[in-house]
Amino acid sequence: MERFDAPWDRSLKVSTGFLLLLLLGLAGGFLAFDVRLSPDPQAIRWGLLLGPLLIALVIPGVWVLAPRGYSISGGELTVERPLFPIRIPLASIRAVRLMARAEAGTFVKVAGAAGAFGHYGRFYSRPLGSFRLYATRRDQLVVIDAEAGRFVLTPATPERFIEALGRAGVTAAATVSPAGAGLAAAPGAPWKLLLVLFASVPLLVGAILGSAWYRAPFAATVEADAIRIDHRWGDPERIPLAEVRAVAPLPVAQSHGWRRINGVGGLGGASYGRFHSDQLGPFMLHAWRSGPYVLLTTGRGPVVLTPDDPAAFVSEVGSRLSP
């Protein structure tokens, strides 16, 4: 067996490092954004781990499909990957050549990854047409035409790689072109990749914050037969007074150790959704500031609010309750 490494060039190291920092930063940002109103170091916030966990899964998901090297053995050329290696029968190879960047043209990604642990997947360029890319650098591209399609690889010492294919029985003539300076465009130009990544971060963060802000509550009003909770966007929510059994200011001792089950915690002082605490158990929270809180005991469970005038709110709701 003959094996050839897939060395990383400088641009791949930079883009991969940036992606890791970006994902770790997003994961940390989700945790910081989604904190409890009253942090409790003894509480386990399993619900808050979902977002960072999904982000963290991207890293191994991209890594396991990236090329690690190339081997020639047993009548096959194998693109080595942690999972799902690519196998190309040597008998199916029709042509092999070393291509320069100027010949390769601009690479357009159809499906796959570019700049994270490697460049791989299905790509297209005008000179090459449709092809499958398994590369880790931007220069010295080995183009292989096989029955299964066209493959572009970047083994170390590409001339020796082509010679090894010949020794292994590949009869197709190898055409060697001058080695170019790098992979083209989409997977290769690091400034374009960084530009896209930088542009996507504020868009992603803005979409998350915007959707959370628009659903945030901002007022509670006592109507004739219900308590109306107004949100910044969308229809107001109403709690029928017939379902309210009791109303009272929430003691300060019970306003600590809250854990979010689902919803938003701490967005500009607003928090809403289903929470849990040792004193209250599961409860619904509609808060647009950090207290003082009012507790409603309803047939559907506790509800915590932050009315603008807690004393007047408690008095008004209490006067409407059935004796």
Image: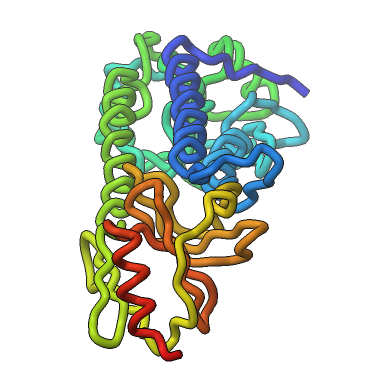
* Res 147 seen here: no
Would you say residue 241 is visible in this rendering? Answer: yes
Quadrant hosting residue 170: top right
- Residue 308: percent from the left, percent from the top? 27, 57
State the colouring used for the structure image. rainbow
Residue at the image position 40 percent from the left and 49 percent from the top: 291
Q: Which quadrant holds the N terminus?
A: top right
Q: Is residue 44 above or below residue 107?
A: below
Q: Is residue 74 left or right of residue 256?
A: right
Quadrant (top left/top right/bottom left/bottom right) for the C terminus: bottom left
Quadrant in which residue 277 is drawn:
bottom right
As drawn, is 298 to the left or to the right of 89? Answer: left
Q: 76 or 152, which is in the foreground? A: 152
Instruction: Pinpoint residue 180: horizontal percent, then vertical percent.
Output: 35, 11
Which residue: 64% across, 17% down? 5
Q: Is residue 109 above or below residue 179?
A: below
* Labels in figure, total: 0
Residue lying at 52% horizontally and 80% vertically, measured from the top left: 300
Residue 236 x, y percent position in the rendering: 25, 72
Q: Nearer the viewer, residue 321 or 74?
A: 321
Q: Position of residue 201 (x, y in %)?
A: 32, 34
Above or below, 115 relative to 234: above
Residue 11 position (above or below residue 268): above
Of the pair 165 and 238, the residue shown nearer to us: 238
Residue 203 is drawn in which quadrant?
Answer: top left
Seen at 44% across and 86% down, the residue is 243
